[in-house]
Amino acid sequence: MRGLIARVAGPAMALQDLGRPGFLAHGLTHGGAADRHAVCEGAALLRQAPDLAVLEMVGTGGTFEATEDVRIALTGAVMAAQVDGCALAWNASHAVAKGAQLTIGPTRSGTYGYLHVGGGFASAAVLGSRATHLSCGLGALVRKGDILPVGQDKGKDVGMTLIPEARLNGGAVRVVPSMQSGDFDPKVRERFEITEFRRDPRANRQGVRMDSDGEGFSNPKALSIVSEVIVPGDIQITGDGTPFVLMAECQTTGGYPRIGTVIPCDLPRVAQAPAGAVVRFAFITRDEGAAIQARASTALAKLSGAVTPLVRDPSTMQDLLNYQLVGGVVSATDPALDEGE
Amino acid sequence: MQDTPFVPTIRSVGLNGLLVTFDDTATDAANRAAIAFRSAVDAQGWPEISESSSTLVSAFFRVDLAEYGFDRLSARLSDVLGSRDWTAASLPAGRALWTIPAVFGGPRAPQLTEAAEAAGLSVAQAQADLTSARLRVLTLGFAPGQPYLGTLGEAWNIPRQVGLSPNIPAGALVAAVRQICLFTKDTPTGWRHVGQSAFACFRPSSDTPFPLSPGDEVQFTSVTAAELERIEAHNGDGAGGALREMLE
């Protein structure tokens, strides 16, 4: 079988794609990759469709051996990466020869790193998607010894790179009003907007808890609201006044009020903020949000135009000889090589 | 009659869609309206709507508001909303009636007595209520395929208990706020564990992964713990001994 064998597996690696739409009415949430932007970047690097499955890695990756020559791309949280001990550039595509050992991890910045393969991971789809959703019993974490099937790859390009959208260290996140924003006292919303939050270490694919000093952000009407629809990006305020940004695996409905909703194109910034990173929320109007999101969607659709060949600077190469010895890391037909570290 | 009846609202949900809400408390009429309204809009097949759902009191339409804009869709939904009294609308066709066997009380459902006390009923009355009521699937949520069933009589307006029960098993019937929830999976909860079934609410590898739909009706029937064990011993398909008939 054409695949990647996980010789070493980090504790939190799972296949994801753009999720499983169409089942909200049945209580099954959309799910999918925490950083959808990274999925699209990887697709652009490999010049393939963004709906193919990728491997999402938190904290660290693992060691993988290809059963056949494959192309890979690396995006999202920056992690150390080597093929047979030779450093690979992140945010770039590479060739990995049959039998070569691809090692990924640990994380250098950000939270969710992605390994893409040419042809995509070809695990069995359930309900139209390959996204792992552990709490619903769909899929499982990748474990040592697993063979991840890889689909047929029609592409050839490797040694390509793009400049990723900066999103790995928190920062300003734009928020549109939500259905319950008006229930919050304007003073509470004002304070929410000027507060510096820190991403709590207790964060997962369901939600990210935001810590702050000073009092919470609860509102007196909050205790009696009827459970209502949740969408990813909703910022729910729990009973003690703590905000949680709800992420890809949020439940479909919930009874805590939402102070606002992070616009979709800023959600990867929340997902990637490492523990302790400072995050600020800025309210914008629904129309402003729609205009920003429309521009972001257009840019995302044109991402393949931003892909350029990797240019290697010989002065940064630690050991030229070592590079020449690595068969298959670099396409023979493509002179643009990977960056040395 | 309320002094000031709730006027249905149309609100945006982030940039992800529009929510039409029929009440600010969980009434049976608002739930019927939400189910009927969602079905009527779905039947019109608007291309902007990528999917829809209904909650206890609202219908949700997923729309990319960055692409299609809120105002135009809100105006169109408002037209449908004003076309009739949705609280008086009949529920959509194609609904099913489920008869689901369950054990009430005893070691398999240890909080029936406590729930009966909270409702001011004897245990026998409580069990009779739970097995005579024809309940409606108000909404599915929290976990895939998991139904919130209602609406029980006023006596059953019992609050959630203060502490969480750490792990109530899949298939459990739990009661609070005039509703029964039938758990998809093991769940910590403040609702009281009054019954236990072997009905699987989510069957990912089946042709019908979500057996229940909003608007379906559910009737529980009381079985002994020994009968439930027999059902559980041959329950590969997750049907839990339930019967399904079409309504109307």
Image: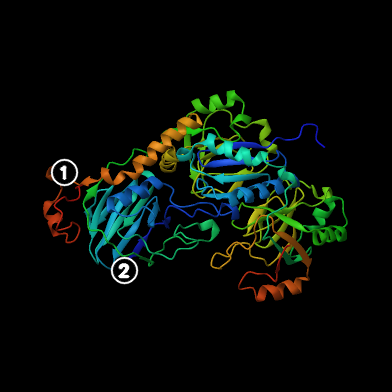
Please, what is the three-letter code of the amino acid marked with disc 1? Thr
Left or right: residue B201 versus residue B67 is right
Q: CA distance from mark 2 to mark 1?
A: 35 Å
Q: Nearer the viewer, residue B66 or A225?
A: B66
Asked where in the image residue B92 lies, by quadrant, the reply is bottom right
Q: Chain of mark 2?
A: A
Say which residue appears at 70% left-offset and 42% top-offset: B84
Q: Nearer the viewer, residue A172 or A178?
A: A178
Image position of A321 with respect to A179: above or below: below
Say which residue appears at 58% left-offset and 39% top-offset: B76
Say which residue appears at 15% left-offset and 48% top-offset: A318
Percent x, y of residue A284 = 48, 29
**Which residue in the structure is indicated by mark 1?**
A316
Percent x, y of residue B63 = 51, 44
Say which residue appears at 58% left-offset and 28% top-offset: A215
Percent x, y of residue A132 = 47, 58
Asked where in the image residue B19 lies, by quadrant, the reply is top right
Q: Earlier in the sequence, mark 2 or mark 1?
A: 2
Q: Residues within 10 Å of mark 2 (few under 14, many from 20)?
A: some
Q: Are marks 2 and 1 on the same chain?
A: yes
Q: Chain of mark 1?
A: A
Residue A2, disc: 2
Image position of B104 with respect to A199: above or below: below
